[in-house]
Amino acid sequence: MVTLTSEEQAMLDGAQGAAVGKAMELLVRYAEALGAERFVETNNVAGVPGSAHPWLKDYYRADGGDYRAVFSRFDLDSDEVVDVPRMNAYSCHLQGGMDPELWAEQGMTPEAHENFLSDERETAAHGIQILKTCTPYIAGNVPVMGEHCAWMESSAVVFCNSVIGGRTNCEGRESTSAAMLAKRIPDWGFHRDDYRLGQNRVRVEVPVEDVFDWGMLGYFVGDAVQDTIPVIEGPISKASLIRHKHFGAAAASSGGVEMYHMVGITPEASSLERAFGGAPRGETFVYDAAERRRIYEMLNAVGSSTDVDYVMLGCPHYSIEQIAHAAHLIEGRKVHANSALWVFTSRAVKATADANGYTRILKDAGALLMTDTCSAISQAVPKGTKVAALDSAKQVHYLPAMMGIEGWYGTTEECIDAACTAKWKGRLQ
Amino acid sequence: MTTETLARPDIVLTGRKVVGGVAEGEALVTRDTISGWGGVNAMTGTVIESRHELRGQSFAGKILVFPGAKGSSGWSAVFHMARLAGKAPRAMLFNVMTTKAALGAVVMRIPAVTDLDRDPLDVIETGDRVRVDGDRGVVEIWKAGARPG
């Protein structure tokens, strides 16, 4: 049974309004399901509140089919429709369904765009920050070590826990929307010290240095440890934001890793002993040259034609460092007539790319810098796409399967080359 | 033989309530974990993940028995949509507790039990008749064909 503080009981009883009461009701049901004994307070919530496909609005048409109806009935799973006030917690909206300007290029209809605009007006009116990204930690929401968060988006969750030392479970839409109102989340899982200790060991025996290799190691780790917490040690170098971003997204896709420890690199793994605490050390998995090759082949298993007609960069959303790199690689070249290049980032990062002239460089080369979404989230690829090239292990895990296309995984350089030649020439160095 | 003895379950498991309520139906069992977003079509209740052993099969109206939830944080929302579309399972039994499975069971509003005293994947087979009493954490199983209609 979950124990409520007097303030939480009052919230449940409606002292802070009907919406907060409904939010607490859902959070209590959720805490009971988890077996949590109490709540933690959170003032850092990232989700996808209130946004809805027209199907969902139509489903609630008897209740008005508006934001209020969707937020009450779907986000709070409430049996009655309540007025939804401004959010109480510091809240942000993660990735959305289309680029605010290039939506037609993405194949969206004017009606879908109208729906997008209407949802966004409501999001803003409810005090939810429109970050519209899977990388809130490079768009204005950087947690600190030990901060209790309630985040969705597996790649952001694993980054928050592992790289920052923030504390969040992989929350869902309903729990984050409720937490935005109630500022509470069940004290379970990654909020608790003992849950954050390593469970299995990964010994790396080949040098892992560039972003491409960090991504492959991430994909290996997830495949090996599934949803447990790995403790990784070995010749891993040049740790940086973009390397961790790619590693975590890959590990979360191939397995379901929500936290990892890299000995001497991540904040809760100053040593092997510290990373495991008193916990049993589980199995040991070895990443060597043969495994590296196996992972490369696995990531390229859905590619057979070398005629690349689409290159997508920006999964997870590109940082300004990555956009600068892509712009540098393509400056003075042109995207091939038989191919297309779309690069995805957040609006905050795009503002910097605009100021630096990177957006213009990409445009002059025939590429597009897009925000808010990605090809997998919006299921949007250039018309007629059959073969995609990607520099993200996560995206190659999802996109070909979702769209029924072929996919190649390689370095950013190989992907830019593919965009400019419409040919895949990637190989494992 | 009386009806009562015929109706006695072949196996009874006990576990921990995740979501209360009582439901009875035919089991659909998988040893593969299940992804929500990208792994399930909510409008049909069908598993769509490539290489999944239930690929192409629908869990709508079944007692879904599986190891646990995996994948995107969109798990609960996808299963929530399945409930609205009338394609949710009738009840859920699973082994590994995660935020995805817990929240998914809550918003589907279906009886769910975990931490069972025997691995449900070992004792329940697809097609078995299963009654889940979420409130008491009791799962009754009639092996396929053993229960009178």
Image (cartoon, coloured by chain):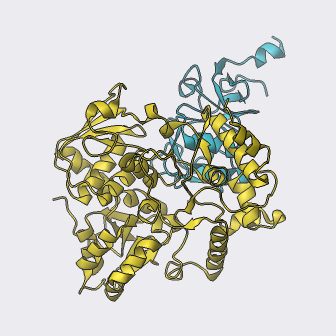
Residue A297 vs A8, above or below: the answer is: below
Tell how many labels. 0
Q: Check the image and report above or below for A102 versus A392.
A: below
Residue B33 image position (x, y, % from top left): 50, 40
- The residue drawn where x is 28% and y is 70% is A415
Q: Answer above or below: position of B40 versus A228.
A: below
Quarter holding the N terminus of chain A is top right
Report which quarter residue A222 is drawn in: top left
Using residue B118 as the reference point, say whether residue B108 is left or right of it: right
Camera sees residue A260: yes
- Residue A336 in the image: x percent, y percent? 30, 83
Is residue B102 toward the left or the right of residue A55 in the image?
left
Mark yes or no: residue B64 visible: no
Question: Horizontal and vertical percent for residue A32?
Answer: 66, 34
Chain B, colour shown:
cyan
The residue most toward the top is B1
User: Looking at the image, which is closer to me, A35 or B85?
Assistant: A35
On screen, residue A301 above or below B21:
below
Picture coordinates of residue A354 (x, y %)? 38, 82
Picture quarter with the C terminus of chain A? bottom left
Query: Between A355 and A406, which is closer to the camera in this rendering?
Result: A355
Chain shown yellow: that is A
